[in-house]
Image (spheres, rainbow, N blue to C red):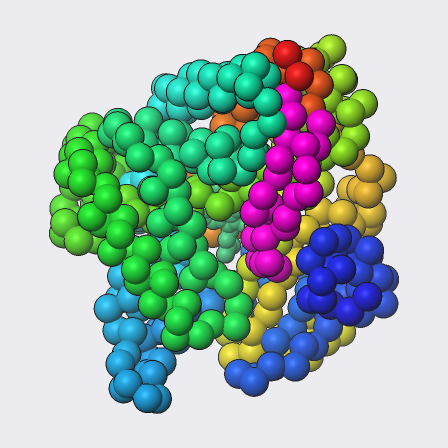
Amino acid sequence: MTLFDRHFLHDPYPEYALLRDTKPVMQLGSLSGKIWFVTRYEHVREVLESDSYAEYDLPAIIEAKVDRTSGRDNGELGKRLSNWLFFMSPPKHAIMKRSLAPLYALRNLDLARNAVWSYARRIVCKSTLEGPCDTIRQLASPLPVVATSTLLGISINDREHIANLASQVLRVFEPLQRMSIYESVQGGLNGLDVALSSLSHAEESLRTLARRAEASASLANLPSDELRALVIMLFAAGQDTISASIGNAVFTLAASPEYFRCLRKHPDIIPNAARELIRFDPPVQIVARVANSDQDLGGAFIRVGERVCVALGSANRDERHVPDAGTLNLERSGLAHVSFGLARHYCLGAQLALTVLEAFLTALVECASSIQFAGPYRRRSSYVFRGFAELPIKFAP
Ligand code: HEM
């Protein structure tokens, strides 16, 4: 197996294990300079926690790219993305993050939990009567839209459309960027702007939140375009991530029915199970940083300006950190994994994502007695987002 080939896409974990043992900080060739690939938990943690590694400034890179034939640039796209938390550095980052935190208050999460639970119940119950369904299109993909719109207090009818656009936008995180991808991302952003015609409600809800919570005063004063960028970021960031976590969980439960039987028998372990499923097969596999100064990482010499990609999926399976890491143990508790990142850029929506997965698993064990594959499945062709493009499943009543 070679890194990033078809087999790796299907199952990267054996290759990760080999790298952790032999070349835990490995140099990859790239046209755009040296890139380091980091697979052990201790090094992944060091990169994410240390101030010696900065945000990878994708918006600036996008802005600088000009299409050779048409002469067109991506200035507008870069500018819009620079309002996303992922790419912000302190102190603006901390202010914005604190401002958005009240959105994920317990009361709001409970509203999202109920909305997701009742939507998932409806689709799973319907499918037990009507036959197989594509888990991704019919279940996993609409659920993030259900969750985020509930959180923002807006109602959306065409969830599939919003889900597709949000997914299109998130392609900006894929490596090997080309002009055609930027065009698609820009198209997704424009589409979301138009499609969320009730965006004014969403803006309103953020401003109301800002007025209520003192910490959010900076949101209240934000210009409209920056606030809209944040709303779109919330939809986009939650889309392929939540959707993949649901698809990956369904795949695991269908492939190993004993786990599903265990959940049905002991639904009280669902909160632990949701965390363990996300540790075992995380939707976001790789995140990037740039060295601020020359660094020694696990004996490798990393020069200032070089890019460092950390493999979250590998760190989660590092036996040096997690006992029996290669085994899925739905009752495992108190585990520190890195599926949501760490430190400054720790995922804003982690609690929401876990709430959605828990609500989904609850609906699943309530409505289905067994789940089986109902046809060939297809993985997404992405190393960054690990998930399925199609996953036909039969839910038995
Ligand atoms: C299972 C679902 C999810 C996974 C696995 C996931 C994963 C991650 C990871 C790994 C990071 C760190 C990125 C980095 O360090 O560069 C991150 C950051 C982030 N996530 Fe999530 N995410 C999920 C769901 C969500 C949801 C539902 C939202 C919606 C609000 C969201 C919003 C964000 C934002 C805004 C950041 C950037 C935070 C910052 O820069 O301070 N994520 N996420």
Q: Position of residue 365 (x, y in %)?
A: 63, 15
**Residue pictured at 79% horizontal, 30% vertical:** 256
Q: Position of residue 28 (x, y in %)?
A: 67, 77
Q: Is residue 276 left or right of residue 382?
A: right
* The stretch drawn in magenta includes residue 381: yes
Q: Position of residue 228 (x, y in %)?
A: 22, 48
Q: Is residue 257 left or right of residue 242?
A: right
Q: On the rendered image, what quadrant is the C terminus found in?
A: top right
**Residue pictured at 35% horizontal, 89% vertical:** 68
Q: Is residue 362 left or right of residue 37?
A: left
Q: Relative to 30, does residue 85 appear above or below in the rendering? A: above
In this rendering, does residue 272 appear at all?
no
Of residue 389 and residue 236, the one placed in the foreground of this image is: 389
Q: Relative to 273, does residue 12 appear above or below in the rendering? A: below
Q: Position of residue 295 (x, y in %)?
A: 63, 75
**Residue pictured at 59% horizontal, 22% vertical:** 131
* The stretch drawn in magenta includes residue 379: yes
Of residue 328 and residue 375, the one placed in the foreground of this image is: 375
In this rendering, does residue 156 appear at all?
yes
- The span shown in magenta is 372-395
Of residue 105 and residue 394, the one placed in the foreground of this image is: 394
All told, the count of numbered labels is 0
Farthest-out residue, bottom: 68
Q: On the rendered image, what quadrant is the N terminus found in?
A: bottom right
**Residue pictured at 38% horizontal, 29% vertical:** 146
Farthest-out residue, front: 130
